[in-house]
Amino acid sequence: MNETLLAMTGLKIWTIVFVVITFSIYLGIAWLARVKDTKGFFIAGGGVPAPANGMATAADWMSAASFISMAGLISGMGFAGGVYLMGWTGGYVLLALLLAPYLRKFGHFTVPDFIGDRYDSSTARLIALLCAIFVSFTYVVGQMKGVGVVFSGFLGVAPATGVFIGMAIVFVYAVFGGMKGITYTQVAQFWVLITAFLIPAVAISLKLTGSAIPSVGLASEVLPSVDPSQPYLLDKLNNLNQQFGFGSYTDAYGENAGKWNKLNVFCVCLALMAGTAGLPHVIVRFYTVKSVKAARWSAFWALGFISLLYLTAPSVAAFARYYMVDDIAGLNGKTAEELPQWYIDWNQTGLIAWVDFDGDGKVSFTNNLTKKMTLAVARSPDGAAVDSASIVLPNELMRVGGVSAAVRAELLADPDAWVAAHGGTKNSGAAAKAELLKLGGAHHPDRDIIVLATPQMAQLADWVVAFVIAGGLAAALSTASGLLLVISSSVAHDLYYKVMNPRASEQQRLRVGRVAIGVAVCIAGYFGINPPGFVGEVVAFAFGLAAASFFPAIVLGIFSKRVGTVPAVTGMLVGIGFTAFYIVTQKADVILLNAEVAEAIIGPAGQGLRTPWFFGIDAQGIGTVGMVLNFVVTVAMTPFCAAPSAKVRAMVDSIREPEDPDALSPAASH
Amino acid sequence: MSAPRSAPADEPLARLKAAYWRRNVTIMSCLLAVWAFVGLGCGILWADWLNQWSLGGVPLGFWFAQQGSIATFVVLILIYALAMNWLDADYHRRAAALKTASENGGAA
């Protein structure tokens, strides 16, 4: 017991050391880069070198979701997890090729501004503005929540305190440093997050496969110390998954793979790609360098740096899967005394909880959720079907973060007593399990702990674990600060300066910018601490809405001079309307207050509209359909509606021309 | 903008701009075609079929979805930066030549 306490304290001390060091660096950089004028505040003076801008863009792009959640998602989903990898990197390609060069030439970095000018319509501007704010905002709240998870998991503080600390730091460096402060802080954050991600990945890769490059390790055989017969890592995972009733790790589609079929994987991936391309905080990055040439190089550097993490994440996912599922290194078959330290640490958060429903004293982490599971086909390593259907015990590894605090405390203190009080262990504890699910518990550990817990699973040193925590914070803070700056510059520049007070002095605009970012940080922090119930659900769909709303409008606006106001606005409304309606019908329970209200409005769960009624497409992928609808409606209406004015056509001509190499950044003409 | 374009002196420049835009669209379309082929094609649509082959211990479709597509995307952005920077330089060279020619022509 004393040893446990000591180990905890060691990790805590390391964590505090790293958090304090990195946060001091961020604040120091912000102080050195503090700014006095609006150009420095909003576009960092337009003079950031291309590689540095690339690192800042990469830090902007790689959010808490990329760092903390993505590998965990892939780990659970196997092949289909690739949609997040391809969606977020492929979206960057769309952004760099289709949008950014022209928006840079246009000279304003917010999407609503472009749409408003291009379609010469305040309705279009307003629709795009609302979508952009909705998308950015749900995204920022997600980051703030990520900060809370990290702090609560490792420092034992309440998530609210964690969010508050993160908020205070962002507040200081964003308010004083503006874009310049944020840019150079993000360069530092990039190094923290990428080394924090790579060090444990390399260490585990060496440990499992003997290869120092995680991507090579993914394709290699495991070392004899892991498995004497030395199968390929992925073959071993396939077998482990099979053994415990999960789908194959590498199979693309079919009954052995995950829940998504080909159509769904395609739609989800495309929705992520088009949706991410519209995120404003990355577009603004194309203004912070001097020339268009530097902007292109910076885009290349950025994706190069991003790919370091994205090429490593699949390996981390596979390694983590091994440590989770394996019956020697992982949790399966462990008794209470044998549970590893990482389980004990994370158990306190409720994100992972073993409840011994059947009372056999051993953990079973399986895909057998109901007790009825029989394996139809078991496969041998060479892929041939064999007849020995193994028994898959019912799953006992849950997450209880969603249940009320009192029940959670009971469950964590003595799960056996809880099971005994709720129907006991007969029938594999089916009554207790049903009760727990009803109270808000769920099967399988929360995916957000995977990346943070993997270094502990592999028994790496405490300082490595602590460094990973600092990396997760860097990822969350860098993205949050970039987005907050864009939100505040929309308010200070587009609303205050352009609309409310066109004669505002430099000093006044700077002050409004600082106040706006301060207010934005506070609002984001508030919702990070008290997330509205639906935010978690909606974050994943924010991309779909972005894809269905402004992506077609921007692309058509740049590449066609014929598309006018009416078709574009109608197209956007149809795209948003369809997508939002579909998402509401699919996620009615959380979006429409609660289950009763949802049932009253659109009928009982699992029937009619509340099934995936559009070709079985998942809510996450419906943005693709909305986007296609938007395109079709706009293009079909165009021949019957007025063409844009000569002024708008001239504007489109001007953004298509090459940029004058001697001119300063076009945003300087703000 | 539209009025001076019809002036004879600006016609070569307008043609130059149109040519620049056409080439720009060509470069972009080719790169996006590769983007779609590798990402959406190999990584998703044909992934199950490609999975019958393996690269080391990784089934090929799985490899494209989680490794190959990302590496391809980086290369695409590199090619785009090189090609567009070349195209810009070429345009500015030609535009400068046109300007000199028209100044000489105006003097004559």
Image (cartoon, rainbow, N blue to C red):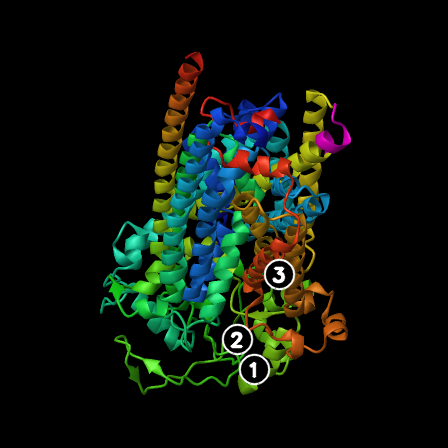
**Region of the chain picked out in magenta, as a range:** A496-503
Identify the residue position indicated by label 2 in the image: A356
Gap between marks 1 and 3 measured at Cα: 30 Å
Res A207 → quadrant: bottom left
Q: Which amino acid lies under the numbered mark 3 shown in the image of this protein?
A: Glu
- In front: A212, or A414? A212
- In front: A162, or A545? A545
Q: Is residue A303 above or below residue A589?
A: above
Circle 2 crowding by C-alpha within 10 Å: few under 14, some 14–19, many from 20: many
In contact (CB < 8 Å): disc 2 and disc 1: yes
For mark 2, name the chain: A
Q: Is residue A569 left or right of residue A374?
A: right
- In front: A292, or A37? A292
Identify the residue position indicated by label 3 in the image: A537
Is residue A175 in sight in this rendering? yes
A499 inside magenta stretch: yes
Q: Quadrant of the C terminus of chain A?
A: top right
Name the spot of residue B31 as percent of width and height, x first: 38, 48
Gap between marks 2 and 3 measured at Cα: 29 Å
In contact (CB < 8 Å): disc 1 and disc 3: no
- In front: A183, or A445? A183
Identify the residue position indicated by label 1 in the image: A429
Same chain, marks 2 and 1?
A: yes
Q: Closer to the camera: disc 2 or disc 3?
A: 3
